[in-house]
Amino acid sequence: MRGVIVYYSHSGNTKQIASFMAEYLGIEICEIKTKEGYLQEDIIEQGKRQIEQNFSPEINEINQNIQDADFILLGCPIWWYTFAPAVKTFLENHDLSGKIIYPFTTSSGWKGHIFRDIEKLAKNAIVKQGLYLHYDGDRLVDSIKTIEKWLDNIKKEMKN
Ligand SMILES: Cc1cc2nc3c(=O)[nH]c(=O)nc-3n(C[C@H](O)[C@H](O)[C@H](O)COP(=O)(O)O)c2cc1C
């Protein structure tokens, strides 16, 4: 089974988790990047507008072979109770039929409905139990053990 970690991160929290996971599982990692950046001072409102308008920002081409992957760990910060728009574009641009998706997310604690939204968009993928991680600014509130436990479960599932 070949797995890959695909993530979007604006301010580095999700990137930190994705990097830890890649090392723990020994699998490839790639970042979703928007072609246009966000204005730091307006990010909350700009993000809100994009989500309200159901906007899909252009993203750079993914530099890993997603089509050959059997499973994907998909990481994303929560923006206004759902996935950041860049992940919406990723899900729209890639046919993930038959693939197993393990979603993980970082947020300030207002969880919303991100995992349900991923399931809706990645129609023919198998979306497994996701992992919510709570950050206070750039400090991870949850323990590393929580992440390891979730990853150990994935490892077990991959063996079966
Ligand atoms: C535009 C925007 C919207 C956000 N909306 C939420 C939200 O709905 N719920 C929440 O708990 N945190 C929200 N946050 C906080 C981020 O989810 C949190 O800081 C996350 O860890 C950032 O991840 P990153 O550093 O990988 O970009 C929002 C942040 C931004 C920039």
Image (cartoon, rainbow, N blue to C red):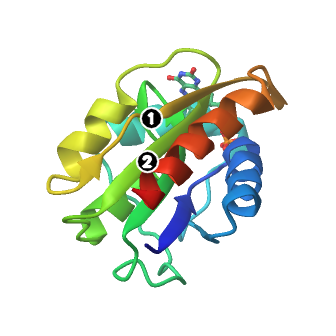
- Mark with earlier residue (1, 2): 2
Residue at the extreme left: 124
Q: Which residue sits at x=38%, y=32%?
A: 114
Q: Is residue 125 left or right of residue 14?
A: left
Residue that mark 1 sits on: 130
Q: Which residue sits at x=61%, y=39%?
A: 43
Q: Give x and y (percent) for residue 121.
A: 22, 49
Q: Name the one closer to the observer, 126 or 115.
A: 126
Classify 112 as above or below 82: above
Tag 1: Cα neighbours inside 10 Å, few (<14), some, or many (≥20)? some
**Amino acid type of the residue that numbered disc 2 sits on in the rendered structure:** Tyr
Q: Is residue 116 left or right of residue 50?
A: left
Residue 118 image-quadrant placement: top left
Q: Name the one closer to the observer, 14 or 85.
A: 14
- Mark number for residue 51? none
Q: Give x and y (percent) for residue 109.
A: 60, 15
Are circles 1 and 2 on residues that touch, CB within 8 Å? yes
Q: Give x and y (percent) for residue 20.
A: 76, 52
Classify 157 as above or below 64: above
Is residue 11 visible to the viewer in this orientation of the structure?
no
Residue that mark 2 sits on: 102
